[in-house]
Amino acid sequence: MPIAFAYTLIGLLVVTSFLLMLLILLHRGKGGGLSSMFGGGVSTSLAGSSVAEKNLDRYTILVGIVWFACIVGLGLWLKLAMNS
């Protein structure tokens, strides 16, 4: 496999790591969190959590899946590179 594949995965891993850290910090904790500054404090009466929190959860899960896929891809690439 070409080395450009590894560099692409490393770059994607750095970007997703930063995004994952930012998204996790935006989540509401016990005391409110940073998400309340961006409209996360408004909640619906039916579900108990806001649309912004649900979307934040979805984005966090999506970025986490991409982050995990980058780590697995790098591991597989290293395994193939060592065997060659």
Image (cartoon, rainbow, N blue to C red):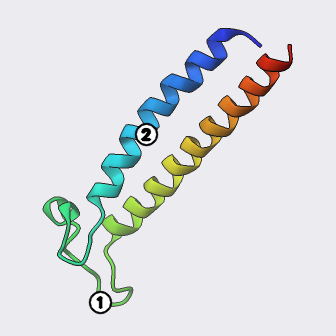
Q: Label 2's element? A: helix
Q: CA distance from mark 2 to mark 1?
A: 34 Å
Foreground of the two, 21 or 53: 21
Q: Residue furthest front?
A: 82
Pick the quarter of the image with the N terminus. Answer: top right
* Kind of residue at badge 2: Ser
Checking the image for residue 45, the label placed there is 1
Residue 50 coordinates in the image, percent (x, y): 31, 74
Say whether residue 54 is left or right of residue 69: left
Sequence-earlier tag: 2 or 1: 2
Instruction: Answer left or right for 18 relative to 35.
Output: right
Q: How many marks?
A: 2
Q: Residues within 10 Å of mark 1 (few under 14, many from 20)?
A: few
Q: Position of residue 57 (x, y in %)?
A: 43, 63
Q: Nearer the viewer, residue 61 or 48?
A: 61
Taking 59 as reference, is 8 above or below it? above
In this view, which residue lies farthest toward the right? Answer: 84
> Dot 2 corresponds to which residue?
17
Residue type, mark 1 in image: Ser
Residue, far bottom = 46
Q: Position of residue 42 (x, y in %)?
A: 20, 75
